[in-house]
Amino acid sequence: MSTPEATRQAPRVDVARNLAARERGGPGFVALLRTELLLALRRRADIANPLLFFVTVLALLPLGVGPEPALLARLAPGMIWVMALLATLLSQESLFRSDFEDGSLEQLTLAPQPLYFAVLAKVAVHWLVTGLPLAMLSPLLGLMLNLPPGGYICLLLSLLLGTASLSLIGAVGAALTVALRRPGLLLALIVMPLYVPVLIFGTGAVQAALDGYAYSVQLAILAALLAGAAALAPLAAAGAIRISTDS
């Protein structure tokens, strides 16, 4: 049976463990990325929940709208993209949560390395364990929803670019709300308007591919959105983290 003293010591043990892992990784971005990936793999439930949500909702879609192949094919691009967006949003709340609760997030703000790279590493790991699996699962779910063959490659490419942008944008909202007890609704209100352009061009690329048109323009816009988010979102998230940890 745990004692009150042991309960108070548990967060300190987690802080020491996380900081020791980061110190072993060294100051380089690749080392930070490797360390954050190892830390993320300890929280397997945070990885599984968005994937289960994504697969379960899309598997239930034919039961809700009917099994007609033509109807499912028309709905497939938009539904897959919307569910990928919501699954990414579902996992954003926990992006900085555990580090904030055990105090290691505050220690990261005091570290000699720029906080920008720590945030970028955490976002990259979030995409590797959430966005990348969602994108890789999308062709299988497209097949289940009778998506025409011409849309699979575009769906995969658009989700690879789009989910990375969603992770970066969501990091800003997660950093702004990390100090709140229940940030879910506020987080959604902050990031949903910023998600809309990614959703529009993502679904537009898949629809253009299905209609037989070139979809390179939409993919180029998604890549431009990703480049802009990669440059600006970690800076904004780092500033929000400093504000949240100082309050």
Image (cartoon, rainbow, N blue to C red):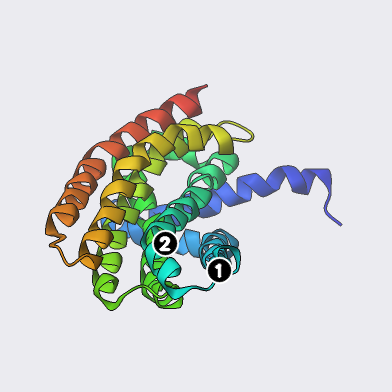
Using the image as rendered, state which of residue 191 and residue 18 is in the foreground.
191
Residue 126, label in figure: none
| Residue 26 visible, this orientation | no
Using the image as rendered, state which of residue 240 and residue 69 is in the foreground.
69
Which residue lies at the image location 35% right of the left edge and 41% below the top edge? 196
The residue indicated by pointer 2 is: 75
Residue 202 placement (x, y as % from top left): 29, 54
Residue farthest toward the top in the current orientation of the protein? 247
Give the alpha-carbon distance from disc 2 to disc 1, as whole Å: 11 Å
Residue 111 placement (x, y as % from top left): 37, 38
Which residue lies at the image location 36% right of the left edge and 66% below the top edge? 135
Dot 1 lies on which element?
A: loop
Which residue lies at the image location 41% right of the left edge and 55% below the top edge? 126
Which residue lies at the image location 53% right of the left edge and 32% below the top edge? 186
In the rendered image, which quarter is residue 181 located in? top right
Residue 141 placement (x, y as % from top left): 44, 73
Q: Disc 2 residue type?
A: Leu
Q: Quadrant of the N terminus?
A: bottom right
In the rendered image, which quarter is residue 127 located in? bottom left
Q: Residues within 10 Å of mark 2 (few under 14, many from 20)?
A: some
Using the image as rendered, state which of residue 242 and residue 230 is in the foreground.
230
Q: Is residue 160 above or below residue 199?
A: below
Q: Is residue 113 above or below residue 147?
A: above
Q: Is residue 31 above or below residue 105?
A: below
Residue 66, label in figure: 1
Residue 122 placement (x, y as % from top left): 39, 51
Which label's residue is closer to the chain start, 2 or 1?
Answer: 1
